[in-house]
Amino acid sequence: MNKLVHIAIGVIRNNEGAVLIALRPTESHQGGLWEFPGGKVELGESVQDALVRELQEELAITPTRMTPLIQIRHDYVDKSVLLSAWEVSCFEGEPCGNEGQPIRWVASQDLSEFEFPAANQPIITAAQLPK
């Protein structure tokens, strides 16, 4: 049985409702695919604290309004993940690919046009639902 990795994910929206996505580095797990920014929840860390830390590291932004969106478990052949996705509707700073990763704003209805890891499909569906 694979070890379960807990990951905090931000579905970040701008004032026009577009969603921020980033391209995973080719050398990482599921590399070369698009993702919603975020990262591992460390031992003793809350999901919210992990998401704030990861978004500061990856994008140089600080979320100021976040609400739970969806939580899913997905088993890959080599890894199991628990994804805790939060909708980030307000943040401070201007997002940039702080780690050299390409980022882009995408209309939520266009998310399906991008190749994401399989575990992200329910998040894409949740992000496309009306409020």
Image: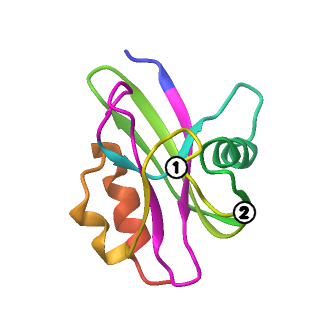
Q: Secondary structure at mark 1?
A: loop
Query: Which of the two residues, 116 or 46, is positioned nearer the viewer here?
Result: 116
Residue, far top: 1
* Residue tagged 1: 37
Residue 105 got which mark? none
Which percent across, then down, holds residue 131?
50, 83
* Residue type for callout 1: Pro
Between marks 1 and 2 in the image, the one whose residue lies nearer the viewer = 2
Q: Which residues are magenta?
A: 5-32
Within-10-Å neighbours for mark 1: few <14, some 14–19, many 20+: many
Residue 93 got which mark? 2
Q: Earlier in the sequence, mark 1 or mark 2?
A: 1
* Residue type for callout 2: Gly
Residue 8 drawn in magenta: yes
The residue shown at (65%, 49%) is: 55
Q: Is 67 positioned to the left or the right of 76 in the image?
A: right
